[in-house]
Amino acid sequence: MFSAEGPSLRELCVQALTSVERGYDHLAPKFDHTPFRTPPEILEATVDALIPAGPFARGLDVCTGTGAGLTVLRKLCQEQVTGVDFSAGMLDEARGAVPEATLVRADARALPFDAGFDLAVTFGALGHFLPSERPAVFEGVHRALRPGGLFAVALGELPGANSGAYWATLGFDLAMVVRNAVVAPPFVMYYRTATARSVRRDLRAAGFTVETIDLLAEDDLMRFSLLLGRRATAQG
């Protein structure tokens, strides 16, 4: 799963026993050498799916990490692209990967933007928010978009119960529940809380109209969808 340049087991344990912010500061220099980074196939499929919905002027990558979503935005947006994350270490890596981007350190649950973007994206970040926190994230993205703006959420569908991936993700989430019950501060990272159904529900509650585009399947175990949330136009 990990390349030779990736983190050691000890480093992963250190990360898991700290807060999300400090954990990713620690992991940032090696993050792109882990399987946690969004696969290039998903990024490329997202670009292909969003091209017909453009053109876009300014783009926002929510929870940008090391900048994977910024590489999508710079292929789609004609003007400025912006990444936001609360890990300074991850932003340092994103700065090196996409030096032309504007990078903002902020909590995605309290985004500091107002009607400035035509397109927002997020990849692989929703598991870092409890279901009760997700509405604040989506409401902040809704505010950050101009009327008619689009929010694209790339989301992996949960694996079937007859697969090894099902039991792996279930075991991981249960381990996180136990870890957070006995260790403070909590490290929020769950694979099974951000289902397509629940994310669609929360997007609609935040004011988006939602459509779903299937992207691809890997070995028939993990299906990826692109949830497209549209902010109403000024007239609608």
Image (cartoon, grey):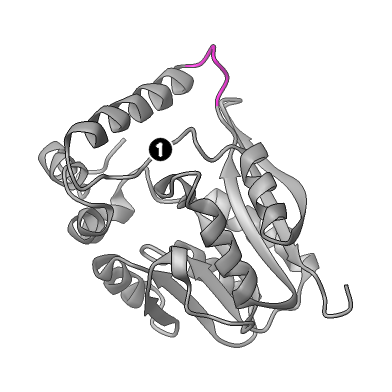
Percent of width and height locating residue 15? 19, 47
All told, the count of numbered labels is 1
Q: Residue at x 29, y 54 (%)?
A: 31
Q: Residue at x 10, y 39 (%)?
A: 10
Q: Which residues are magenta?
A: 159-163
Dividing the picture into quadrants, the one containing residue 58 is bottom right
- Say left or right for 52 vs 25: right
Q: Considering depth in this image, is 6 or 147 the residue closer to the camera?
A: 147
Which residue appears farthest toward the right when viewing the image? 235
Q: Quadrant of the N terminus?
A: top left
Q: Quadrant of the C terminus?
A: bottom right
Which residue appears farthest toward the bottom when viewing the image? 79
Badge 1: residue crowd in 10 Å (few <14, some 14–19, many ≥20): many
Q: Which residue is mark 1?
A: 190
Position of 165 relative to 20 (above/below):
above
- Say left or right for 22 vs 133: left
Position of 208 relative to 185 (above/below):
below
Percent of width and height locating residue 155? 58, 45
Q: Considering depth in this image, is 18 or 96 the residue closer to the camera?
A: 18
In what element is the residue under mark 1?
loop
Residue type at the position of mark 1:
Tyr
Our reading of the magenta stretch's main secondary structure is loop
Percent of width and height locating residue 188? 34, 44
In the rendered structure, does residue 162 fall within the stretch colored magenta? yes
In the rendered structure, does residue 63 fall within the stretch colored magenta? no
- Say left or right for 4 vs 155: left
